[in-house]
Amino acid sequence: MMNNYSDETSVVLLVEDELLVRMAAAEDLQDAGFHVLEAANADVALAVLETCSHDVQVLFTDIDMPGSMNGLDLAESVQQRWPHISLLISSAYHRPLPQQIPDDGRFVPKPYSSEDVVKHIRELVTSH
């Protein structure tokens, strides 16, 4: 499958069930130069990855969301199936223990600043 992304454009899969939060985060990431794919829950995110996992460099997911799995379970699944994808996990309600975050994944608490998220994602892209 051919993509429409340039070699310089990093692709972020943003998984957030709150529409307004997802829209604001997607806009911030696009303004920072990332191509953003959006999913409202883990099930949609996995469907997206089934078709274009080779394009995605970073999964940015909320922990608390409806569906068959939460963001930590999604991150674990992504790490096992697509180890090339870096992980950035967020929550307003949970502070996961380091061992709950797969591999070199990172956690950013909500409310987060767009600058913080962009910094984490750029570091994840360049370190992977």
Image (cartoon, grey):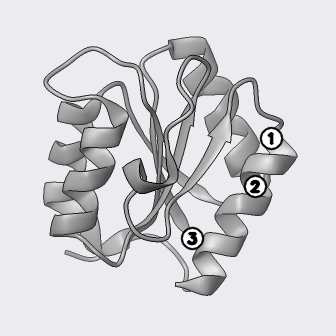
Residue beneath disc 2: 118
Q: Residues within 10 Å of mark 1 (few under 14, many from 20)?
A: some
Amino acid carrying label 3: it is Ser
Element at label 3: loop
Tag nearer the camera, 3 or 2: 2
Q: Residue at x 55, y 79 (%)?
A: 6
Q: CA distance from mark 3 to mark 1?
A: 16 Å
- Identify which residue, 121 or 50, lies in the foreground: 121
Q: Residues within 10 Å of mark 2 (few under 14, many from 20)?
A: some
Image coords of residue 52 (percent x, y): 25, 63
Image coords of residue 63 (percent x, y): 43, 29
Q: Earlier in the sequence, mark 3 or mark 2?
A: 3
Q: CA distance from mark 1 to mark 2?
A: 6 Å
Residue 100 — which label? none
* 30 relative to 115 in the view: left or right: left
Element at label 2: helix
Tell me if I can see residue 8 in this picture: no
Residue beneath disc 3: 10
Q: CA distance from mark 3 to mark 2?
A: 11 Å
Q: Are marks 1 and 2 in contact (CB under 8 Å)?
A: yes
Amino acid carrying label 2: it is Val
